Structure formats: C-alpha cells, structure tokens
Image: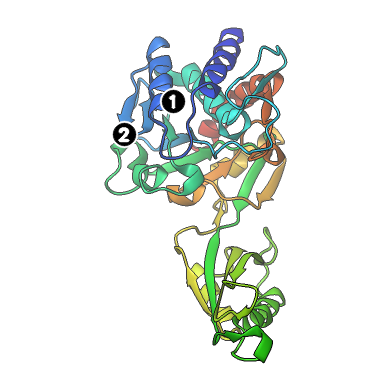
C-alpha cells in the first residue's frame, strides 16, 4: 500500500508538469501509458485515451470500468504559482489538473494495480482514462462507450466515475444544456428615437426565462436550474442594436428530456433558442444497484452532483466518487492533499471488494 501511494503521488507530479488541455493530451497519455508499462500492465491506446484490463479478463463476465479523465481546462489568468509546477511540498501536490482530475486518475491506477493480477475476480475490471472530458469532445468517452469503441468498454456492467467529490458517492448528477438565444430588432439612430431595440426585447425575454418554472421536481436533484450567463449586443454607442444574442445555461434533471426542456421556454419567450447539443443528459444510479448496496454497506455519504462528468457518456449504471473537492476545480492555484490520494486508494480498493461481492448476490 505504501508503494501504491508513493507511486501515485510521483506520477501525479509528473502529470502536472505536462500541459494536457482538452484536445492536446498526447504527451500526458504517453506518460501514463509508460507508467502502466513500468508497473507490469499492458495498456492499449485508443487515440488519446488509455485503456487497460485486468489479467484474468474474460469475455463472459460483466465489467466494472474505473473511469477518469486526463485532460484539463486552460490555466486561469489569476494563478499565483506556475500551473505546471507541482512543487515539493510533502503534504500536497499543486498545479493545473492536480485535483481535477489527476488525483482520481492516479488513485484509480493504484486500485487497478491492486486487483490487476488477481485470478479469482468474479468480474472484469477495466481502467479507462479518457481525453476531451472538459470539452465534451467526440474522441474521448463518447468514443470509448460507443458501438465503435473498444470491446472492453462496450461490455455490460457498471461504472465508477472518478471526479473530485471528497470520496462521497454521487448517485445522481444533473445534465447540461447550453442554449444560444437571439432577439431581433430594427437598427436606427439613437438620437432620433428610431428602430426597434433588440437589446430591450432580449431583456424582456431573459426576465421571462429567469422566472420560468419547470414544475416537475426530482426527488434527488430538485428543480431544473436555468441561468442566463452571457449577453452581447450593439455595434456603436449611437446605433440602436438590431440583434442581441445571449447564452442560457440549463442543468436538467431526470424529470425532463433535454428536448422537452428546450421546447418549453420557447412557448413563452420570443427569441430563437438553439441548443448546442442534446446529448448531455442527467444521470442516476439504478434502483437496486449493487453499487448502491456497496455504498450503503460501507457507510459512504451520498449526494446529488450539480456538475456533469463522463457518467452521462457511459450509458451504464454508475456512481461518481473521487478524491479532492469540486470547489477547487477550474480555480487558480489548484491542489490536492497527499493524504487525500492515500485515503482514496484505500477506499477505492475497499469499495471494489465490497461491490463485486454484492454484484453476485
């Protein structure tokens, strides 16, 4: 166990030093693949994704996929440290991606190593470390869990999604809809009271959206959350704008399909609302799932997550659980505590052992 913890922290420090913003993960994927090989594991590269399966893997068994992502968001301008310098602090690892999602990556690798050579596993265990998660790209988890993806991630079974949750288990998570709104008016000179101001039209419609009520309430996630987050209009101070565009962020629950959510506000608001995609649906652990049984048996706290992850792309029964805190993600001076990594490795191992016993009941 001490070796697993040391190797995990050492690997994470190396990962932080390699820039791996979404769509540019080649070098960090190569680094992780080389580390797995040094541990005696034979990884498979699927584009910029890294896949590995346990030694006694068998086609007839169901699969537990350990899923985490290797990409990061760009570094915030407000960093006071070098975002690619993990530092030498013995108690924490600094840097971009250390918390989201490097700590989950290295902790899951350690847990996978623990089970890798066991001959009597009743299930397959597959490690799936994906690219493009932060940007919902087509060549990350969407590829891995599609009909065109590798056989290992297409087998029926379950998912353990590694994201910073303080090692609590998210048993549901909201989806994500981004709508591009557009209000049209007529341009004119501001001094002569000409035209129809598209900005004013948009403001009225934004107020309608702000007060829109999605009346179906999820017992786990509550109400659908809608927030207008961006607005843009005008070309000059003295020209009445004939176009105003704005962006709406919506966090769906399982009580509505994404198509339903898009259609409902359109009936009360005048502007065109165009979804960027309808694929980012909400997720929830299946009722009666052996994942839930393991969570309950171990006394792990549960919650409903407001953020999306690869879960929605797996198409399988899953929970989301990993080291670190979501509040540190996408913030300057990101870090993870070394103790959090050690605790995660132990809890992942304990959870997997408890889970595969429950999966046979």
In the depicted structure, whether residue 84 falls above or below residue 146: above
Residue 228 placement: quadrant: bottom right
Toward the left, the furthest residue is 148
For discs 2 and 1, the disc positioned in front in the rendered view: 1
On screen, residue 8 versus residue 218, left or right, reads left
Q: Which residue is mark 2?
A: 46
| Residue closest to the eye, 209 or 114 | 209
Residue 183 sits above or below residue 343 on the image: below
Secondary element at image label 1: helix
In the rendered image, which quarter contains the N terminus? Answer: top right
> In the depicted view, which residue is nearer to us: 125 or 167?
167
Front residue of 239/316: it is 239
Q: Is residue 118 visible?
A: no
Q: Give the mark nearest the N terminus, 2 or 1.
A: 1
**Residue at 65% in and 16% down:** 87
Residue 28, labelled with which disc? 1
Q: Position of residue 106 (x, y in %)?
A: 54, 23
Foreground pick, 313 / 274: 274
Query: How would you rate the neighbour count of disc 1 (Cα within 10 Å): few for under 14, some for 14-19, many for 20 or more?
Result: many
On residue 333, which mark appears? none
């Amino acid at each position: 166990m001490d070796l697993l913890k040391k190797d995990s922290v050492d690997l994470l420090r190396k990962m932080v030093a390699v820039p791996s913003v979404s769509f540019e993960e080649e070098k960090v994927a190569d680094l992780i693949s080389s580390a797995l090989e040094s541990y005696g594991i034979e990884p498979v590269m699927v584009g910029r994704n890294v896949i590995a399966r346990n030694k006694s893997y068998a086609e007839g068994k169901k699969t537990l996929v350990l899923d985490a992502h290797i990409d990061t968001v760009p570094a915030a301008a407000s960093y006071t440290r070098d975002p690619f310098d993990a530092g030498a602090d013995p108690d924490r690892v600094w840097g971009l991606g250390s918390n989201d999602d490097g700590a989950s990556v290295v902790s899951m690798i350690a847990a996978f190593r623990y089970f890798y050579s066991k001959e009597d596993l009743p299930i397959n265990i597959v490690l799936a470390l994906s690219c493009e998660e932060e940007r919902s790209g087509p060549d990350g988890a969407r590829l891995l869990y599609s009909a065109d993806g590798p056989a290992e991630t297409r087998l029926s079974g379950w998912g353990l999604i590694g994201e910073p949750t303080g090692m609590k288990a998210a048993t549901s998570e909201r989806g994500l809809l981004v709508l591009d709104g557009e209000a049209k008016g007529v341009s004119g000179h501001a001094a002569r009271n000409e035209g129809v101001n598209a900005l004013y039209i948009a403001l009225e419609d934004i107020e309608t959206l702000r007060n829109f009520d999605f009346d179906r309430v999820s017992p786990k996630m509550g109400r659908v959350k809608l927030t207008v987050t961006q607005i843009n209009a005008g070309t000059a101070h003295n020209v009445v704008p004939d176009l105003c565009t704005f962006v709406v962020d919506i966090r769906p629950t399982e009580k509505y399909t994404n198509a339903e959510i898009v259609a409902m506000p359109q009936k009360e608001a005048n502007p065109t609302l165009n979804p960027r995609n309808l694929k980012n649906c909400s997720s929830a652990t299946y009722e009666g799932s052996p994942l839930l049984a393991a969570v309950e048996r171990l006394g792990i706290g549960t919650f409903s997550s407001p953020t999306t992850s690869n879960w929605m792309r797996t198409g399988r029964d899953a929970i989301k659980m990993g080291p670190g805190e979501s509040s540190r993600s996408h913030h300057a001076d990101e870090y993870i505590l070394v103790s959090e990594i050690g605790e995660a490795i132990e809890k992942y191992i304990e959870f997997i052992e408890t889970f595969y016993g429950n999966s046979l009941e």
